[in-house]
Image (cartoon, rainbow, N blue to C red):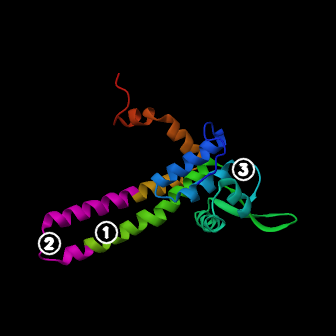
Amino acid sequence: MTEITDKSDPSAKEKFILYWGDMGGQWSVNRSVAQIHALLFLSPEPMNAEQISEELGIARSNVSNSLKELVGWRLIQRVPVAGDRREHFVAETDVWEMALLIAKGRKEREIDPAIRAIDVCVRQAEKEKTLHPVALERMQEMHQFLTTADRWSEQMLSVPKSKLASLMKMGDKVLSLLKIGGKKG
């Protein structure tokens, strides 16, 4: 857990790191991984594992494992620092790029395996004569939903960041344009 010397009024940086760690826990990301990501995101300079361990009060072994996970997500990268043989790390600081990396990573780790698993279930269910037709229909609906959502997310991930930002800022205007919601007047 992050070390905070003055418990009554932590700095904004400390609050951000603690909050990011808590938020990570809510998203099924290890708290230490999320806190290290937050620290590197806020850091103006590359940091090595010892610095991270000392600043956050996290065991060095936990820092090493967390750094490997963050590198795997491509949210941080190793960078050389002249005159220092230790590995140093920096975080992706473009919030749009970071969001896209997280979305792509979650898709690869969660959505793709779910689609494959449900596809196997649907194919097996289609051959089982004793399965109630409602169960088969619901499995097919779930598979269709996931593949449709997957295609949509693939399309959104291919939209240039500037266009995606503009689209998101439009908010209710998009819904009104499509006549599916928005403000009533």
Residue 67 placement, left or right of 108? right
Q: Amino acid at mark 3?
A: Ser
Q: Amino acid at mark 1?
A: Ile
Element class at badge 2: loop
Which residue does the image show at 24% across and 64% down from the upper left?
139
CA separation in Å, label 2 and label 3:
57 Å
Q: Quadrant of residue 92?
A: bottom right
**Would residue 139 be counted in the magenta stretch?**
yes
In the figure, 140 relative to 156: above or below? below
Query: Residue 74 in the image: x percent, y percent?
Result: 61, 62
Mark 2, residues whose alpha carbon is within 10 Å: few (<14), some, or many (≥20)?
few
**Residue on which disc 3 sits:** 43
**Residue on which disc 2 sits:** 131
Furthest toward the top, the residue is: 185
Which residue does the image show at 48% across and 60% down from the upper left?
106
Furthest toward the right, the residue is: 83
CA separation in Å, label 1 and label 2:
15 Å
Earlier residue among tags 2 and 3: 3
The stretch of residues the image draws in magenta is 123-149
> Which image quarter holds the C terminus?
top left
Which residue does the image show at 51% across and 40% down from the upper left?
167
